């Protein structure tokens, strides 16, 4: 299975450009792009998107994401990974 990534909107769009420069075959989206959650999407909705899209989240949101992730798991949800 190919690993697929979603960059949180709090990360610079330049990160995606840099990753694709190193390896254009990587499947990577950023919040706010087409086929990804829109800018301003709440953390619980991003987690549901990750579960359905089978993507791994790359974020530096240490303020609210951990609590939302705990709630997501408590409700029986899962995600494919988190960096």
Image (cartoon, rainbow, N blue to C red):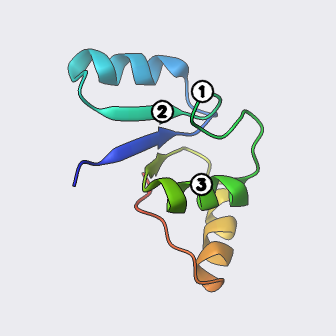
Asked whether, in this view, residue 48 is left or right of residue 42, the answer is left
> Dot 3, how many residues are within 10 Å of its Cα: few (below 14), some (14-19), or many (20+)?
some
Residue to which mark 1 is pinned: 33
Q: Is residue 34 above or below residue 69?
A: above
Q: CA distance from mark 1 to mark 2?
A: 7 Å
Kindly report the distance in space between the C-alpha atoms of the residues bearing marks 2 and 3: 12 Å
Residue 63 seen in this snapshot: no
- Could you tell which of marks 1 and 3 lies nearer the N-terminus? 1
Instruction: Read off the residue under disc 3.
Output: 49
Measuring 58% from the left and 39% from the top, which residue is drawn there?
A: 8
Marks 1 and 3, how far apart at CA: 13 Å
Location of residue 46 in the rendering, given as x and y in whole percent from the top left corner = 64, 52
Q: Secondary structure at mark 3?
A: helix
Q: Could you tell me which quadrant the N terminus lies in?
A: bottom left
Q: Which residue is mark 2?
A: 29
Kindly check if marks 1 and 2 are in contact, taking CB atoms under 8 A apart as contact. yes
The part of the image, by quadrant, that contains residue 18 is top left
Residue 76 placement (x, y as % from top left)? 58, 83
């Amino acid at each position: 299975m190919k690993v697929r990534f979603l960059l949180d909107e709090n990360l610079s769009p330049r990160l995606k450009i840099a990753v694709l420069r190193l390896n254009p075959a990587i499947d990577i989206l950023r919040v706010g792009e087409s086929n990804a959650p829109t800018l301003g999407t709440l953390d619980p909705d991003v987690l549901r998107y990750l579960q359905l899209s089978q993507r791994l989240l790359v974020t530096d949101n240490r303020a609210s994401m951990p609590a939302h992730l705990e709630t997501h798991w408590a409700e029986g949800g899962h995600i494919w990974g988190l960096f």
